[in-house]
Amino acid sequence: MDKNLYRLLCCPQCKNDLITKPGKFYCKYCKQTYRINGGIPDFSYKINESGMKLSQKKWNEKYRHDAQKNIAGELDFLDRKFFSLVRSQIEKHHRLKKENVFLEIGCGTFYFGRHLAKLGYPVVGIDMSIEALKLAQTVFKQEGIKNYLLVCGNVLDMPFKKNSFDLLYGAGVIEHFPDTFSAVKELRRVLKKGGVAYNTVPYLNIGSLTYRQIWGNIPRLPWLEAAFTFFHTKILGGRHMRFGYELSFTRSYLEKIHRQAGFSGAKTGQFDCELDFDYLKNKFLRRLAIFLAKNSPLFWPMIYVAGKK
């Protein structure tokens, strides 16, 4: 852990500077104290919003299960399968330089940041699951990676000073916040002028209204959102919400809320991702599903939104 990156930290509640003390951080303005949990700055506090509580529960369950796996091997697999594909798409909007500071929100076990750290970039990851961060930290220590900072906290109230990061990446994160606009505003706050927030999210189309319902997806449309939320949370009790509370969006909506949040511009488009559709046992149906998801906007699973400050 690079303690020089502590300079980026602030109180998540009042946004003032923190005083570093043994095993904790202290804010002299609002008198809040935050602990360092197993070497990880922990700014988590009680979450009251039901959608976020459900997401936190689902992801904590996943990472407790992942603790039984070979995490280094799992990260190597993710690295080989996804890193080059994701980076090539991000760098169409912002090319990293060695002096740039990279932030990944909802970083989980931080495979993307791990690769960038090995290339010499200073990297910061934030997640609300301390279990995920401890897994990432274990691998980083084993591999001798030091140019990183892992933080436990809430993306809606990040413990980072304004104008801290050159590039921000979220792989399927902002859709888990019912108050998406507030999340986008917070992303802009921590970016430097000219910095880019690059996020991938589920696309609201025929695919999200049909097959993505097996994961409890909720379309962000006024006349559908309430009905789908009631169905998945009240009638089904969240049983099919594999990733917790998860929204899907139109491109126009994402561009609009980024402009409203103060970004100078926002671009959206298809996000190219690996697809397998393992749950389809028929080979023809699987190939058809992959073809449609790759080639038809009606079935794209994910889109990106790149907002420039």
Image: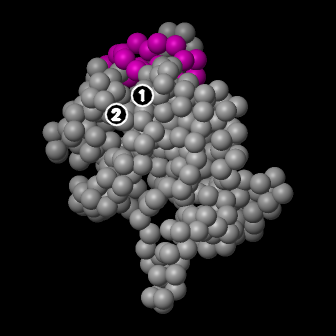
Q: Residue furthest top?
A: 28
Residue 160: horizontal and vertical position, in percent?
47, 24
Answer with left or right where residue 76 lies relative to residue 158. Answer: left
Mark 2 neighbour class, 10 Å CA radius: few under 14, some 14 to 19, many 20 or more = some
Residue situated in front as seen by the camera: 92 or 13:
92
Instruction: Report the residue at 36% width, 47% height from top.
Output: 87
Residue situated in front as seen by the camera: 291 or 16:
291
Q: Is residue 57 visible?
A: no
Q: Which residue is mark 1?
A: 166
Q: Label the magenta part by its dominant secondary structure.
A: loop
Instruction: Report the residue at 39% width, 51% height from top.
Output: 86
Q: Which residue is mark 2?
A: 96
Answer with left or right where residue 31 lies relative to residue 217. Answer: left
Residue 3 vertical position relative to residue 30 in the rendered view, above or below = below
Instruction: Report the residue at 67% width, 59% height from top.
Output: 204
Label 2–label 1 contact, CB within 8 A: yes
